[in-house]
Each structure stands twice: as structure tokens, then as C-alpha cells.
Amino acid sequence: MVLQIDASDPQAANALFTADGFDELTPEPAFDYRVYDLNHKEAEAKLALLIDGMTKVEDKTGRFVYRREWEWPQAIGMNGLFDYYQLASSLDPSSSTAEGVLDLMKDWYRQRNNEGIPTKNINSMAVMYSVACLVDLDQQRGKGSVLDDEWRTRFGEWIDEWAEWIMNDLPRTPEGGFQHLTFRLPNEGQLWDDTLMMTVIPLTKIGLLLNRPQYIEEAKYQFLLHIEYLMDPVSGFWYHAWQFDLNGGSKGRWSSDAPWARGNCWITLAIPMFIELTGLPPSDPVHRTLVSALHRQVDGLVPFQDPATGLWHTLIDDPTSYVETSGSSGFVGGMLMAIRLGLLDREKYLNVAVSGLKACLAQVLPSGSVGNVSKGTPAGKDRQFYKGIPRMGMVYGNSLLIVALVQWMRLNKGVQA
């Protein structure tokens, strides 16, 4: 279990975000993304390398336990692995590749269970999306097809318990927003863009699985509330966090005016995921609002794609900030998903998305590590804070690129099983 750092100990909290004890991972691209031939065989090879690399990211300082911990970095990877398993097994029910991926996922959950379930927070809730997906697929394909009795029962207990905690016990901001509680800090009165991906999407999936419409209605409200406070209506980009004035109702301020790439990529992913999960019709006001927000953001992203590397900068609108792979992977994955769902026009956006994916793959090292990934990042007070975050080999660099690559496979309807 991870010790939660109290807000009264800023030195300990700030130590998590320095480069001390780490070697920066800022390699040159492995190839020119503009001439790279991405095909299914190459995609399979890169995916296998990324999955292997995801299990080998090391913590040299003891401050991070992201390689093994029940937390969002691995949870996002589990999302991508589930999508890959579902795709590969649907094309070939006897696929050894699919079975290997499923075994890898089960082994990860087994290890986490043996270590002890962590405290509940916004980010640890992210694990519940892939858990609910496996339960749902087991029901669809027939009891016992994916999970045995023991794990089906355990998973069922987990998703029920954690969703009820979100609905009834998670601290709220003014106006009922989900407070971005983490294992480090309570972040009292704060809305973060990460929350939609880490908690609202899992809650939506669980609500559909357990037939609890109140969860879906809550998820809709959280999307709308986060749009209201975090999206810049001019640029379409999202700010990392909103801090409510706890003595002033809905008054407050953004943590900074920095359009941080990885924070923004959670929106690019979460909006099409929510629409696909819920099946909201195009005439639904929530559907229309979400698609409008997605279009604003993506149309803002397109001109800021760095032509030399194909990536986006860690501050999207600041070419003096470094290019960053995890946020870029999230942008690409969300665009490809939205194209597949018909939310973005294929002819207009596909080349941007595919070139971005190739650029992200150019950051993969032979070891399976992903270069130019910024470390874990709290809500900073100014732009310089985000520009100063060091780049390391982080689990979520692999996780987000796995998600993007699998979305490319889904769009192209196939894998080499």
C-alpha cells in the first residue's frame, strides 16, 4: 500500500517530481516518421516490444512503484491490453496471442490482489475499467469463457464496492464535482481533467454493466461540469486543474493557464470512449456538447503538431517546450477512436493521427522503453513548472502508446494473430 503524502509536507511531495536519482530519457527518434511504413506485421512487433517494456520499467530511487502498483499508469495499459485481447480473440477464438495477453492481465490482477488492495482514490479507480470490461466480456461470451468462478466473483465485488465509494464517499467540490483525491494529496476543492479518464469512464462502464442508470447520469454531469470549468472556449484546450474558492461557492481559478499535453490527452480519449460506451444518439444534448468540445480541442491541436518530430509539445502552444510522447500518444489514440466512431472526419484527420502514431513509435527504444515521456506531474502554478518536468522511462509512456496502436489496429479491422 502506498503512503499518502500530506499537503503539510511539501518537501516530500515536491521530491516526487525532481530528476534526482533518475537518468533522463530523451533519445533521438529511431527513424524518420515521415517515411516509416506502418503495417500490421510491424504493428504487432512494436506492440509486443511495448508490452514487454511495460513490465520492465524500473524505479531507481524507491519513490515510485509504478511498475507494480495498482494505479493509473498500469490501468491505462490494461485498457489497451483488453482492447487488443478482445480484437484478437474475436478474429480468432483460438489465438495464442490473445490468450497470452489475457494471461498477462490476469497475472497482474493476481499479483495486485496478493499484495493487498490499495486505498481508494481517483487514480486507483482507473483499474476498475478493465476489470469491468473482463466481467462484461465473460457474460457476453458465456460464463467461464474469460474468467473462472473465483475471479468473476472477486471482480464483481470490486466493481460494486469501488463504484459505490465513488458515488457516496468520494469528497466533492462545490457543485458536486469529483475532487481529485490521490494517494499523495487530497487536492481539496480541485477539479482535474485527469478525473474524467481515471474515474468517470470506469464509473460509466460499471453503471452499464450493473444496470445502474444513476451512475450514467452522474457521469454525464461530471463531463459537463469539467467542460464548464476546465476547457478554454477560445483555444479548445483544457487546463490541468480548477481550484474552487472554498469560501466562495463556485468562484475560483485555474491552477495555471498552461495547456499541458498529457492532461489534454485524457480528454481526447475520454470523450469518444464515453460516447461509444453509452451509445448516446447524435441528437442527445450531451452527445452534441461532448463532440463540440472534442472538435474544438482537435482542431486546436492540428496546427501545433511539430513537423520535425510529428509529436506535440508538453505545452501544446509553446514550441520552446519539449516534445512529449505520452500526451502525443493519447491525442493519437483519441483521434483514431473518434475517426472509427464517425465523430471525426476520416479524410480530414486520419493523416494527422497516423503521422502522430508513427512519430510516437519512433520514440520506442530496443529495450521497449519509450523516450521523451514527462514524469508524473501535479497541477503546476505556471507554465515554467510544466516545462521543467524531467523526462524518464515511465510505465504510462508504454501504456498510452499501446492504447494508440491498438486503436489503429481496430480502425484497420485486424491483427496478425
Image (cartoon, grey):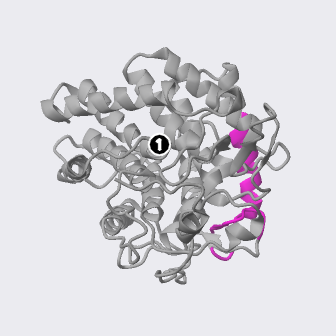
The residue that disc 1 covers is 121
Left or right, 313 with reference to 271: right
Picture quadrant where residue 227 is located: top right
Residue 306 visible to an observer of this rendering: no
| Residue 316 painted magenta | yes
What amino acid type is highlighted by mark number 1? Asn
Q: How many marks?
A: 1
Pick the front one: 379 or 298: 379
The one nearer the camera, 90 or 280, is 280
**Residue located farthest toward the front when viewing the structure as drawn:** 8
Dividing the picture into quadrants, the one containing residue 124 is top left
Q: Is residue 325 visible?
A: yes
Q: Residue at x 57, y 42 (%)?
A: 195
Q: Secondary structure at mark 1?
A: loop
Q: Give percent across and percent down for residue 216.
A: 53, 22
- Residue 11 drawn at (x, y percent): 58, 68
In the rendered view, would you say 157 is above or below 131?
above
Q: Residue furthest right?
A: 234
Q: Is residue 81 left or right of residue 184?
A: left
Q: Which residues are magenta?
A: 292-318
Q: Nearer the viewer, residue 299 or 55?
A: 55
Q: Position of residue 76 (x, y in %)?
A: 43, 51
Please tell me which residue lies in front, 59 or 407. Answer: 59
The residue at the point 49 percent across, 29 percent down is: 169
